Image (tube, grey):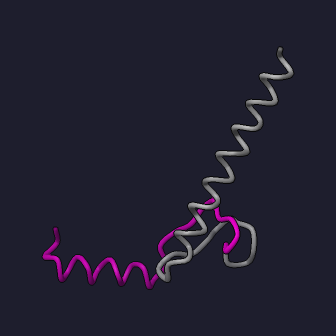
Amino acid sequence: MEKFTIMVTIGMILLVLIIWGLIGSSQVSEIGNTCDIGIDDQGNIFCWTWHRNMVGDIQDNLNNFFDGGK
């Protein structure tokens, strides 16, 4: 029973990592985001951490300006 529980736990952790990597790769596909840690140089396959780059910051500032800071 313990071995089964350990295998299920490992399987769930791997599933979460795969889903998070896919979410990250879709976020990085936008021009305003850059992948920090992922598979492939640009995070096209999986990306687990990403951040807004300078283009994304400019987009955010323009959106705030034209939306009146809402």
* Residue at 45%, 83% in the rendered image: 54
- Whole-percent x, y for residue 32 in the image: 47, 80
* Residue at 62%, 53% in the rendered image: 19
In the image: residue 64, left or right of residue 30:
left
Please state, as top left, top right, bottom left or bottom right, where the C terminus lies in the image: bottom left
* Magenta-colored stretch includes residue 47: yes
Q: Residue furthest right?
A: 3
Q: Which residues are magenta?
A: 43-70
In the image: residue 56, left or right of residue 8:
left
Q: Residue furthest top?
A: 1
Q: Residue furthest left?
A: 68
* Residue at 60%, 54% in the rendered image: 20
- Whole-percent x, y for residue 30 in the image: 50, 78
Question: Residue 21 lies in what quarter of the image?
Answer: bottom right
* Magenta-colored stretch includes residue 68: yes
- Whole-percent x, y for residue 13 in the image: 70, 40
